[in-house]
Each structure stands twice: as C-alpha cells, then as structure tokens.
Amino acid sequence: MNETKYIEESFKKVENILKKLKETSNANAVLLIDKAGQLITSIGDISSLDLTSFATLSAADFGATSQLAELIGEKSFSSLYHQGEKNSLYISLVANRVILAVLFDSKTTLGLVKVRTKHASAELEKILDDLFEKLKVSPKKEVFDRSFLKEAEEELDKLFGP
Amino acid sequence: MALINYAAREINVKIVYYGPGLSGKTTNIKYIYEKLAPDLKGQLVSVATEQERTLFFDFLPIDLGNVRGFKTRFHLYTVPGQVFYNASRKLILKGVDGIVFVADSQIERMDENIESFENMIENLESYGMKLEDIPYVLQYNKRDLPNIASVEELQKNLNKDGVPYFEAIATKGVGVFETLKEIAKMVIRHLSSKAPA
C-alpha cells in the first residue's frame, strides 16, 4: 500500500471512531485539531460553526492552559471543560499530538462524554501512533513537486497582482 | 510544519507576524482583512485587551484556492509584541512555516526591534527550530514617520541573513500585500525544495 493510500485508510478509521464517539456520547459535534491550530476533521452538526476559528482558538486554549499547568508543577492538563448555559465543550489531548474537542448540550452529561472520550482516545492513539511511525519518511514529496510550485505561484499572482 | 490533509485534500500553511509591541503586526493583518474579497478570507479572530493591544494573537485564514487538487490555505497569525507576553508568543510560533518580522522604523525603537528579533530566535530554538531553516522576510514599517532610521541602518541591525525586506506604511496599506505575497511564495518554494526535481 502506498503512503497516500495508507493515510487515507487511517483517516477513515479515525473518522469512524469519531462518529462512534459522537453517537455513543450523544454529543453534537466532535472535532480533531492539530496542536498548531489546524482542523484535521470534524463530525456532526457544525453548520453554524466557524471551524477554522474554532480550531485555532481550541489549540490556543490548550496551549495556554498547558503553560498554566507547568506553573503549578503539572506537566500538562490532560483535559479542559468549558461549561456554557446551553452548549459545553470538553477538550482533551490524544497521543500527545492532537486535540479532541467534543461539543455537547443538555441532551447528555459531562460524565458520559468523559467516559466515551476516554475510550475513543485510546483507539485513536493506537491508529495515530502507527501512522506517525510509518510516516517518519515525510510524504510531502508527493504533493509539493515543481508543478505544484508553479501553480501556487500563479494563484498568488492572481490574488495579489504580479 | 504545513499540515497536509490527504483525505480532505487540503494544505494549511502557517505564517506568523512577529515583532516588538506597536510595530504594526495587527495593522498588517487588519488591512489584509479589509481589502481581500469575502470569498477569499475567513473570520478575523482577535484575542486582544480592551485597549486593542494584542493579548494572545490575531488570526486570519486566507484561501488560495485549488492548487493541483489541494485546497490551499494560508493561516496568518500575529504574536503579542509586548515583552511580558512571551509565553503566548512562544505558543503561536508552534508549527510555523514562515515568518514576517515587522520592525518599527522609528530610531528610538531600534533596540526593541533587535531585542524582539533575538527573542524570536530563542523561542524558535526552544522548539528545536533554527531561523535559517524557516523562510522569513523583514518589513520596515512606519516609513511615513519623521524620526525614522535609514533602511541601511535597519538592514545592518536586523538583516544579517540578507532576506527580502519591504518598506511599509501599514496604516495606509503600503507594502502590506507585497510582504505577504513574498513570504507566501517563499514558503511554497521552501516546501517544494524538499521534493525531488
């Protein structure tokens, strides 16, 4: 199996785990975000959500609280909980690499969300560890070839003027 | 590191505007936000104090459109410039693909420019990154003010690597898009340079 194919297969598995998490925890949406604030994927009702901003702020939120954790002698906080009047947010770190955010309301409880998230995290961790192990050789070369460079530069000229 | 999402066929590139407090980083981003067509940009997110000083960061996503079947997006961030916000500044640098260093051209701000530049190198090193491995450009901002240092002076103090530099008046948009376009191209070239010919 080539690398791209392998990544796509792993990605499907990840999405299935997230779907299951959303259903079993009765949450509204589940998002996977990298630590630099970029959205990897999302499941559920996110039509009213500005996903890019959401991802950026979640990662910043997590980064800031990790620093807070260090100040009180903790390595990091493994999870964060933000309680709102209607919607709440539970954020946790998976495999020390990606941020899992669960958006939920009064249809479910924090306890259930926590338990289901813990299960899902364990499954995700296994897939992600395997994936990163396989990807020690960067797959970038498949995307960023000369023709990509040329097209990207043309788009930039179009956008900002030559 | 640029995030490539193969399944969604997306590439996200992170560009950070760095520099001392009040040098005009947020002004750059705000100008870009105001001038870009709505279909090319996302929400401008600002985590700022009540006095409009950046507390954590500003963030603006820009869509480059489809490149070879990949939806390519630039994420622009600013750091808070004030010295005591270093913890936040460091966080924003995580995963950076390209840097715009915005310097304040006023003579009395030269020391702060140099200090901020050194602070940037230190913060990158804390992530095991070296400045010479990251595409970056310099922007000498506030060229319309009376008490400014010459470009030669700024070059001597800040541009030891001889990277591209731009004179700017960010409040009027002068040099803003030129700076952005150059760093965007440099990042794409840098990513491509790692690929075989």
Image: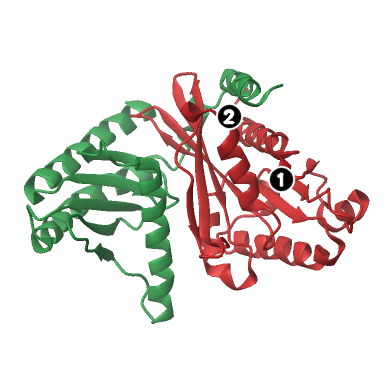
Disc 1 + disc 2, Cβ < 8 Å: no
Q: Counting other residues with Cα less than 10 Å from the Cα at mark 2, is it few (<14), some (14-19), or many (20 or more)?
A: some
State whether residue A16 appears in this view.
yes
- On the same chain, marks 1 and 2? The answer is yes
Amino acid type, residue under disc 1 in the picture: Ala
Question: Disc 2 on helix, strand or loop?
Answer: loop
Residue B137 visible in the picture: no
In the image, residue B120 sits, relative to residue B187, either above or below, namely below
The chain shown in green is which? A
Q: Is residue A115 left or right of residue A58?
A: left
**x and y, in percent, of residue B59 in the image:** 50, 48
Q: Chain of mark 2?
A: B
Mark number displayed over residue B170: 1
Residue B12 drawn above or below residue A85: above
User: In screen coordinates, is B193 left or right of A20?
Assistant: right
The picture places residue A39, in percent across and down from the top left corner, at 37, 42
Q: Could you say which chain is coloured red in the image?
A: B
- Image spot of residue A85 (x, y percent): 19, 60
Mark 1 element type: helix
In-image side of B86 versus A12 (left or right) = right
Give the image's coloring scheme. by chain
First along the sequence among labels 1 and 2 = 1
The mark closer to the camera, 1 or 2, is 1
Image quadrant where one finds the C terminus of chain B = top right
Rendered residue at 92%/50% (across/down): B152
**Gap in angstroms between the C-alphas marked 1 and 2:** 35 Å
Name the subunit of mark 1: B
Q: Position of residue A153 (x, y in %)?
A: 63, 23
Badge 2 amino acid:
Ala
- Kindly identify which numbered label has been placed on residue B195: 2
Q: Who is closer to the viewer here, A4 or B150?
A: B150
Q: Residue furthest bottom?
A: A72
